[in-house]
Image (cartoon, rainbow, N blue to C red):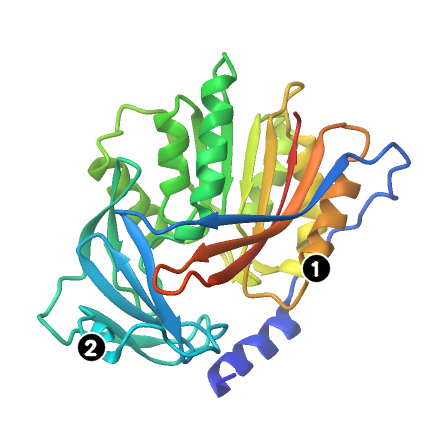
Amino acid sequence: MTSESKARRDRAIREKAPAAPLLPRRSEPLPAERLPVILEVLPGDDYALLDSGDRLKLEQYGPYRIIRPEGQAIWRPALPQGEWDKADAVFTGDTDEEGMGRWRFPRAPLGETWPMRHDGVDYLGRFTSFRHVGVFPEQATHWDYMETLIRNAGRRVKVLNLFGYTGLASLVAARAGAEVTHVDASKKAIGWARENQEVARLTDKPIRWICDDAMKFVEREVRRESTYDIILLDPPAYGRGPKGEVWQLFDHLPAMAEACRTILTDRPLAVVLTAYSIRASFFAIHALVRDTFAGMGGTVESGELVIREKAAGRALSTSLFSRWVAQ
């Protein structure tokens, strides 16, 4: 961990908002459970993990090959160095998950943005100083599952996408026919998401883009008695709202989960939680989600999201997940 990231962590500990008081543990029957569940993304035309190793990963996004740090890739690369040398962009600098860095373009200078696609949905990739490019491809299995739920519901479905980032999940849901509310604390991310809606030619779809602190937004929805059929949560381990609100996953996730239960409709479909960059097992969030949805029936499925590598077939784990599904 760099001195900057340590300082950020220490400052967060000093300034963190107090966790909301929680209700006593429910005595109703727990939902059924299914675990471990491994959801994997295979190499495709839009995206592929070509190779990995030596704490790096070589990815293909449409026409571009990109090299980024990957701390879990402690094995050796399977492809020869010549294949890695064909990369169009290489992230250099701090390898901390939220560390600053910059991009190097070995072959030809590339613009800040470039067109990408997921399952027919066009959007913009962007070379950010935090190594991300605007999409987390491992989430594709959640998007496919959500799209199936929406199309099979036989009614208009309302989706709440919390910590929505650049909006790809929101676009997939809207394309499937859902009415979507997208919430993110970053004005820059909201602007990017709006750009993506235009690029995807989905401006006629009902999406509300809201720049707000996710916890405060959900608390207001509880008071307004607003409800949703599907809720997506992809919170960071640590984050800040637009007015400096502090988010700490382990401190604030229990209250967030409780609030999400409160704003479900009387015919809910699913609540999907993904957690990344945390030192925990999926058993932790599995137990939380199962306790939270006690008395509601359904099933809690938990495990890991992985990307299957093309070169040697190795599985790269990217995040933990737990989802409550009504059916």
Q: Where is residue 97 in the image (x, y as percent from the top left)?
A: 46, 71
Three-letter amino acid code of the residue under disc 2: Gly
Three-letter amino acid code of the residue under disc 1: Asp
The residue positioned 39% from the left and 60% from the top of the image is 309
Left or right: 174 in relation to 18: left
Q: Residue furthest bottom?
A: 3
Q: Name the residue under label 2.
A: 82
Please identify the quarter of the rendering in which residue 267 is found: top right
Work out whether residue 137 or residue 34 is closer to the camera in this orientation and state it: 34
Element type where label 2 sits in the image: helix
Q: Earlier in the sequence, mark 2 or mark 1?
A: 2
Q: Residue furthest top?
A: 154
Q: Position of residue 296 (x, y in %)?
A: 76, 28
Please identify the quarter of the rendering in which residue 122 is found: top left
Q: Position of residue 214 (x, y in %)?
A: 54, 46
User: Badge 2 local density, few (<14 within 10 Å), some, or many (20+)?
Assistant: few
With respect to residue 256, does 104 lie above or below? below
Residue 90 shows in this picture: yes
Work out whether residue 87 or residue 249 is closer to the camera in this orientation and state it: 87
- What is the spatial separation of the Cα atoms under label 2 and label 1, in whole angstroms? 46 Å
Q: Position of residue 292 (x, y in %)?
A: 76, 40
With respect to residue 307, does 25 lie above or below? above
Q: In which quarter of the image is the C terminus?
A: top right
Q: Name the residue under label 1.
A: 251
Q: Which residue lies furthest to the right in this view?
A: 27
The numbered mark at residue 4 is none
With respect to residue 214, does 316 lie above or below? below
Left or right: 225 in relation to 40: right
Work out whether residue 14 or residue 80 is closer to the camera in this orientation and state it: 80
Left or right: 226 in relation to 290: left
Please identify the quarter of the rendering in which residue 179 is found: top left
